[in-house]
Amino acid sequence: MELLKIDNLHTIASDDESMNILKGLNLTINNGEIHVIMGPNGAGKSTLANTILNSPKYIVKEGNIYFDGQNINELKTNERAKLGIFMSFQSPVEIPGISVSNFIKSALNTREKVQLYEYIKELESTMDELGIDKDKEHRDLNVGFSGGEKKKNEILQMLMLKPKLAILDEIDSGLDIDAIKTVSKGINMYKNDDNAILMITHSSKILEELDNYIVHVLVDGKIVDTGDKSLVKEIEENGYKKYID
């Protein structure tokens, strides 16, 4: 079933309307699929992720975004999140004053009130699976966390919130091999036939633990090639030269 459909999307920067970033991008993601976006710096990868969640940094000038059959062009960020869209960030922010546990519980409560005992039980079990120390549960969100701990915390949020679509924007950047394996484990724990993943990455390391993904090459605001994991190997060997020259 079609979960996300992006039709002829044109996006500009809100602080410089002469800067065209996405230039007629088309993409369809079905339930049960993992889609990987790769491309050179400045191609529009993060812009795509942020536009799907309606970041104020970008303005849609043309085209439509459909999620679960609904046109979401006019929906605010929180409304899109409530529909089931989740996004992890390249550089997760630190939020003093709210603990990891309360942050996730508050997000869940926007959909329906959680049962505290069952919530804590699931949270601590998921933290165990990801190798996250229990003391992090009561720490302020990301405050004093290492880069790897912040990325694991993003995956923890994804697993607890159970979104229909998880957008992972360079979730593997800056991680060592062990942390990448943990993040990959979390992705595999999340993945099922009723949800989907849109992953942006520069590296094949995180993809080694995943199966049956679709790769798209994004260059100058458009998807210029699509393939399977063999396309990743080709990019590693030859870069993006053939798409740019």
Image (cartoon, rainbow, N blue to C red):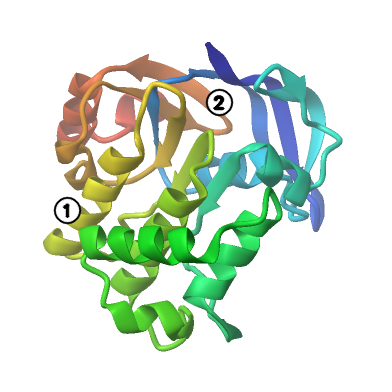
Kind of residue at badge 2: Lys
Instruction: Using the image, determine if residue 68 lies above or below residue 235.
Output: above
Image: 62 above or below 124: above
| Image-based side of 140 in relation to 176, left or right | right
Give whichever of 105, 80 is nearer the camera.
Answer: 105
Q: Residue at x 48, y 31 (%)?
A: 219
Q: Is residue 170 above or below residue 220?
A: below
Of badges 2 and 1, nearer the viewer stands 1
Relative image position of residue 43 (x, y in whole percent): 51, 40
Determine crowd level at label 1: few under 14, some 14-19, many 20+ residues with C-alpha closer than 10 A: some
- Left of 82 or right of it: where is 125? left
Quarter where residue 37 is shown: top left
Residue 153 x/y as whole percent: 39, 66
Residue marked by disc 1: 181
Q: Nearer the viewer, residue 42 or 88?
A: 88
Count of numbered marks: 2
Q: Residues within 10 Å of mark 2 (few under 14, many from 20)?
A: many
- Residue indicated by mark 2: 222
Residue at position x 45%, y 53% from top?
160
Residue at 49%, 68% in the rendered image: 92
Secondary element type, mark 2: strand
Image coordinates of residue 83 in percent, x first then y, are: 68, 37
Q: Is residue 75 visible?
A: yes
Closer to the chain start, of discs 2 and 1, is 1
Residue 112: x and y in percent read 67, 50
Q: Quadrant of the C terminus?
A: top left
In three-dimensional space, the C-alpha distance between marks 2 and 1, rounded to whole angstroms, equals: 30 Å
Q: Identify residue type, mark 1.
A: Lys
Asked if residue 20 can be seen in this view, the reply is: no
Secondary structure of the residue carrying numbered label 1: helix
In the current view of this chain or complex, which residue is farthest to the top? 1
Look at 81% across and 26% down and name the residue there: 62
